[in-house]
Amino acid sequence: MAARKGRRRTCEPGESMETESQETGSKGQAQVYLPGRGPPLREGEELVMDEEAYVLYHRAQTGAPCLSFDIVRDHLGDSRTELPLTLYLCAGTQAESAQSNRLMMLRMHNLHGTKPPPSEGSDEEEEEDDEEDEEERKPQLELAMVPHYGGINRVRVSWLGEEPVAGVWSEKGQVEVFALRRLLQVVDDPQALATFLRDEQTRVKPIFAFSGHMGEGFALDWSPRVPGESRAWVGMGSGEPHPAECDEVESRLPFPGRLLTGDCQKNIHLWTPTDGGSWHVDQRPFVGHTCSVEDLQWSPTEDTVFASCSADASIRIWDIRAAPSKACMLTTTTAHDGDVNVINWSRREPFLLSGGDDGALKVWDLRQFKSGSPVATFKQHVAPVTSVEWHPQDSGVFAASGADNQITQWDLAVERDPEAGDAETDPALAGLPQQLLFVHQGETDLKELHWHPQCPGVLVSTALSGFTVFRTISV
């Protein structure tokens, strides 16, 4: 949530991350600002974060902005709520020149919660203690980068057995797979990180690459149900795996799992594991969409089923057991009024969530998908929706981001209390959807968000203004 007036601090690579700070002392009662609903900001006014609405809030910058990222599952445990937090991200840049791009591993740690406001009776000694405490609470960022020619449109990470890998869609029309184990190792060890950046980063190459899409794309998803195994391999790898060379060392490369990739030419290709620790990419595309394929999602419950969405306004359900030309089993032709940008398949319910250029969020019950009608439609965003994701633990909760620089949190189970009567006197607030829990603002050109699968309620987003890690009081 946001009120008016404030300032912001962020961090650059190699520096401590900084939390947002708030300037108090503005005259009059604070007003909640809602994009598209007014009142508009007056000259000299800025938005300021209401820190009491957040349990956790941190920001970071990495130089060039990142269009896409993914959270890397770690071995620090599930359901972690104790602060400070540590988390790992894999991201790709969209730099001004092709040769300036990087694939990055980020380790964010010492992430403390937001501080309560000082009490009225605090004295100088308490203020000095607060300054010392503030130094100890500074969030930290470690960053391991490898060169990548071309901007990175999308990054998706998977653990294939014990091996972490990243699927990367390049603006140069190529899909690559990178092994991440070494990058994960060095961000945990400052000395190893220095050695890596000095001697090793330019040697890191993809372990597999596919150029058959004949153009760039964005859609990419690893199967959650057909995992890979790990096989020993020698060499850094470039494109197809190859025998060891004399100056290379043994590393464990993944025996891969299934992967789907879709491009702006309306084609979807299936990557299937091979016995040699590589992939076979079927050159026959899945046929059905008439415009760019914007997003892909494997079913979390069926090994052979996936969903796709497109700029042709449709959402389709496919079964790979059929020939690619006949694999489309279900279609909603006009799922949105315009491009369908993003979809997300619930891991706990038979629901598919979609967001489009029309700013709408729609929930589809796959048991009723043939009807062509969503079971719920929400309209809070006033610009195209750029990312959607179901909460990994709470089946009714989801989050969305939009080009209107809003991140919204929703709960399908919430209904307005009929006994509240006329308590909601503010017409703007009274007109909000009942299921809307929280509106986060203050970012610029939001692109993507993800819930952390091991830290309940923690959201991470990327935007032109950088990364944000936060948890609200609502989830």
Image: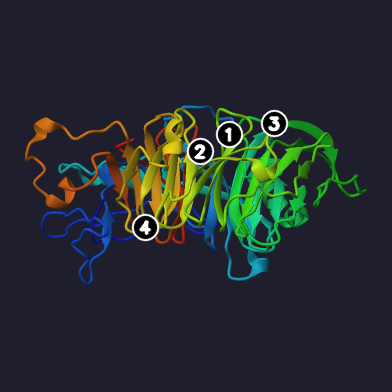
Q: First in sequence: mark 4 or mark 3?
A: 3
Q: Residue furthest left?
A: 422
Disc 2 on helix, strand or loop? strand
Please provide percent x and percent y for residue 132: 37, 45
Q: Is residue 150 above or below residue 76?
A: below
Which label sits in the foreground, 1 or 2?
1
Q: Quadrant of residue 174?
A: bottom right
Residue sitting nearer the eye, 426 or 338: 338
Residue of label 3? 162
Q: Quadrant of residue 102?
A: bottom right
Residue sitting at 54 percent across and 49 percent down? 295
Contact check, label 1 and label 2, Cβ < 8 Å: yes
Residue of label 4? 405
Q: First in sequence: mark 1 or mark 3?
A: 1
Q: Could you say which disc has been placed on residue 86 in the image? A: 2
Q: Is residue 12 above or below residue 133?
A: below
